[in-house]
Image (cartoon, rainbow, N blue to C red):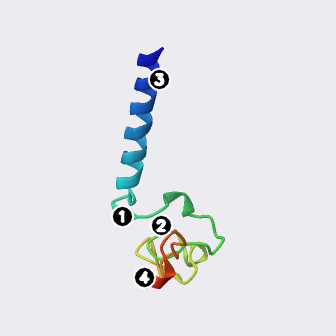
Amino acid sequence: MKLSISALLLATVLATANAATNTASDVNGVKCIRPNNIGAGDGYGYGGYCCKTDDDCRVGCVNKICNGPGKFDFSVNPASY
């Protein structure tokens, strides 16, 4: 039982570490963030998100990547800006 819990914990740690290091996706040769934003058409795409048309982005879609400001990181202390 201890071995299976240890193995599960190790797998969880490795998966979390891998997810944290892979922030950009290679979609058809384009490095962008959040590939599931492609074709959504909801205008939610922040700077660096993947896109198909301008409708996928808050500002505009340039070379399959949304331009404009990035998404604000609420986990960062605002006093550090």
Q: Nearer the viewer, mark 1 or mark 3?
A: 3
Q: Residue at x 44, y 36 (%)?
A: 12
The numbered mark, 1 or 2, whose residue comes first in the sequence reads: 1
Residue identifier under label 2: 50
Q: Are marks 2 and 3 in contact (CB under 8 Å)?
A: no
Compared to residue 12, the image places residue 16 above or below, namely below
Residue identifier under label 4: 80
Quadrant of the snapshot with the C terminus: bottom left
Disc 4 packing (10 Å; few <14; some 14–19; many ≥20): few
Q: Are marks 1 and 4 in contact (CB under 8 Å)?
A: no
Q: Residue at x 33, y 60 (%)?
A: 29
Looking at numbered disc 1 in the image, what kind of residue is underneath it? Val
The numbered mark, 1 or 3, whose residue comes first in the sequence reads: 3
Residue 55 in percent (x, y) is at 61, 76
Looking at numbered disc 3 in the image, what kind of residue is underneath it? Ile
Q: Are marks 1 and 2 in contact (CB under 8 Å)?
A: yes
The numbered mark, 4 or 3, whose residue comes first in the sequence reads: 3
Residue 74 in percent (x, y) is at 55, 72
Element marked by disc 2: loop
Disc 1 packing (10 Å; few <14; some 14–19; many ≥20): few
Please indicate whether residue 34 sits to the left or right of residue 3 in the image.
Answer: right
How far apart are the two marked residues, 2 and 3, measured between alpha carbons?
A: 38 Å
Residue 70 in percent (x, y) is at 48, 77
Residue identifier under label 1: 30
Q: Residue at x 41, y 25 (%)?
A: 6
Q: Residue at x 41, y 49 (%)?
A: 19
| Observer-nearest of 34 and 70 | 70
Residue identifier under label 3: 5
The numbered mark, 4 or 2, whose residue comes first in the sequence reads: 2
